[in-house]
Image (cartoon, rainbow, N blue to C red):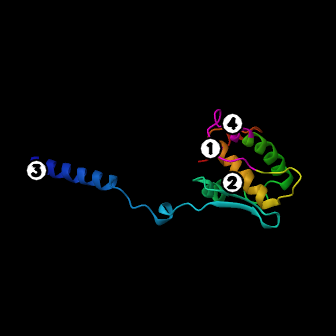
């Protein structure tokens, strides 16, 4: 009986250890995340975003292309760029690791849907990831 209990105990411990052992990480997770390029070739405009997690957000979490109108995203982007640039220019008050660069977004230029879509979604992503509020009520947006 004692041997049976010991054997069951060993099997139980082995099972627990086997289930808790590390699992190989898939190649997809180990690959370096590719930067997202926001560009409009005809305007010679380009933003490169290397923020980890943004690719996933853009492809799996963000509303699909066409969900928001270009006009809506432009109005949000104009307001958010002003706040972003003000913070980027005040590194003593705001985290310079988040607000590394200012964004040259001119309100009188039509950057097109794709540029506005990616920039808009980056602002949504950044507000959630860094728990910031750029204004406009999107700070309650959640990334799961």
Q: Label 3 belongs to which residue? A: 3
Residue 24 pos. (x, y %): 39, 61
Alpha carbon of mark 3 to alpha carbon of mark 2: how far?
58 Å
Viewer-nearest of discs 2 and 1: 1
Q: Label 4 belongs to which residue? A: 90
Alpha carbon of mark 4 to alpha carbon of mark 2: how far?
29 Å
Of the image marks 4 and 2, the number of the one nearer the N terminus: 2
Residue 96 pos. (x, y %): 62, 41
Of the image marks 3 and 4, the number of the one nearer the N terminus: 3
Viewer-nearest of discs 1 and 4: 4
Residue, far right:
108
Alpha carbon of mark 3 to alpha carbon of mark 1: how far?
61 Å
Of residues 20 and 15, which is closer to you in this image?
A: 20
Rendered position, 96 above or below 56: above
Residue 51 is at least partly visible in this image: yes
Q: Label 2 belongs to which residue? A: 62
State whether the magenta stretch is mostly helix, strand or loop.
Answer: loop
Highlighted magenta segment, given as a residue range: 86-103
Dot 3, crowdedness within 10 Å: few (<14), some or many (≥20)?
A: few
The answer to which quarter of the image holds residue 26 is bottom left
Of the image marks 2 and 1, the number of the one nearer the N terminus: 2
**In this image, 63 relative to 73: left or right?**
left
State the SS at label 2.
loop
Q: How many marks?
A: 4
Query: Residue placed at 63% from the left, 33% from the top?
Result: 92
Dot 1, crowdedness within 10 Å: few (<14), some or many (≥20)?
A: some
Is residue 106 located in the magenta-colored stretch of the structure? no
Residue 71 pos. (x, y %): 86, 52
Residue 1 is at least partly visible in this image: no
Of residues 29 and 101, which is closer to you in this image?
A: 101
Q: Are marks 3 and 1 in contact (CB under 8 Å)?
A: no
Q: Are marks 3 and 4 in contact (CB under 8 Å)?
A: no
């Amino acid at each position: 009986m004692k041997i049976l209990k010991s054997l069951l105990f060993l099997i139980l411990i082995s099972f627990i250890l086997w289930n808790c052992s590390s699992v190989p990480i898939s190649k997809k997770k180990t690959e370096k995340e590719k930067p997202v390029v926001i560009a409009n070739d005809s305007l010679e405009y380009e933003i490169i975003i290397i923020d980890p997690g943004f690719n996933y957000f853009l492809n799996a979490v963000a509303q699909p292309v066409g969900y928001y109108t270009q006009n809506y995203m432009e109005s949000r982007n104009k307001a958010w760029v002003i706040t972003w640039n003000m913070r980027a220019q005040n590194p003593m008050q705001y985290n310079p690791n988040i607000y590394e660069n200012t964004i040259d977004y001119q309100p009188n230029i039509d950057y097109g849907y794709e540029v506005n879509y990616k920039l808009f979604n980056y602002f949504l992503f950044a507000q959630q990831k860094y728990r910031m509020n750029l204004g406009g009520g999107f700070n309650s947006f959640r990334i799961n």
